[in-house]
Amino acid sequence: MNFEFFKYQGTGNDFILIDNRQLFFSKNDTKLIAHLCDRKFGIGADGLILLENHTQADFKMVYYNADGNESTLCGNGGRCIVHFANHLGVIQNSAKFEAVDGMHTASIENNIVSLKMNNVSEIKKGDNYLFLNTGSPHHVELVDAISTFDVFSEGKRLRNETYGKEGANINFVEQVSEAVFSVRTYERGVEDETLSCGTGVTAVAIAMRELNLTKADTIQLQTPGGVLTVSSTKTTTGYSDVFLTGKATLVFKGTWS
């Protein structure tokens, strides 16, 4: 099977994007998806995303982790598919699309994509962490000296020992200033540290507000792959008007055969 693919990255979180409006791509072939994402024998990516038609929105987003399994929302992937839809001419400067966690809206201008995330109302507080779902499940934990912290070993341990087979994404955070935080994330499905995680930094921003470490409505998150911003409105029941904003980049396109 020959098909065209597009390689995208959003602050170092990289994805294979495929225009599947004609439904030619087999969504049940987990081995093929994992092979395409393999960095030694395939194209290489943190995940694969299909853009499909939708009867009531501009398009539908179908997301797979690098292990080949369909997964929960990917924030950076959501920003990249908005750029991809703009590149294909499916949208212009704004979009409405459906992902696994429901409908989303977004805007794009000069490669900067702002993605509206779902409201967050449930936040669990543990002994030294917070747990919340921002489209994907996230563990958020403050650490010291994040630049030398062993994200892989500790992230892998928490992902498996604390959250079991289903797992969760593990975010380690260090405060830089009142409204700036440094974040590193171990992602389930990739089973490694990634350069950035969109739903992860969204979870971190909300968690830092919940811990009263910042009172800012807009927070800057520094990841190994670049800088993202998250804005939100604190309400009596949680957080609404949550927006994830950052650059999305088309790296290259090619043909798989």
Image (tube, rainbow, N blue to C red):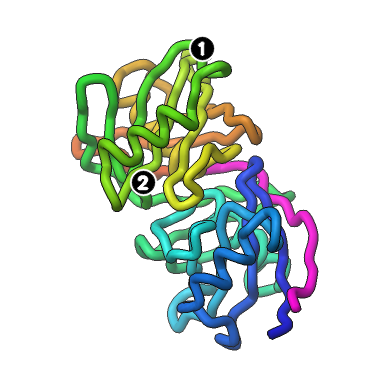
Q: Nearer the viewer, residue 93 or 66?
A: 66
Residue 255 belongs to the span the image colors magenta: yes
Work out whether 108 lies above or below 253.
Answer: above
Residue 45 belongs to the span the image colors magenta: no
Is tag 1's residue or tag 2's residue first in the polypeptide sequence?
A: 2
Tell me the number on the disc at residue 145. Answer: 1
- Residue 232 appears at what percent x and percent y? 40, 37
Work out whether 148 lies above or below 84.
Answer: above
Q: Is residue 219 visible?
A: no
Residue 75 located left or right of residue 14: left
Residue drawn where x is 49% and y is 64% of the image = 68
Residue drawn where x is 53% and y is 82% of the image = 26
Q: How many marks?
A: 2
- Residue 104 appears at what percent x and percent y? 44, 60
- Residue 155 appears at what percent x and percent y? 41, 32
Q: Quadrant of residue 34?
A: bottom right
Element class at badge 2: loop
Element class at badge 1: loop
Report the quarter where the C terminus lies.
Answer: bottom right
Task: Count neighbours of disc 1 (C-alpha within 10 A) and say few if under 14, some if 14 to 19, many if 20 or more.
Answer: few
Whether label 1 touches label 2, CB < 8 Å: no
Q: Name the residue beneath numbered marker 2.
A: 134
Amino acid carrying label 2: it is Thr
| Highlighted magenta segment, given as a residue range | 244-257
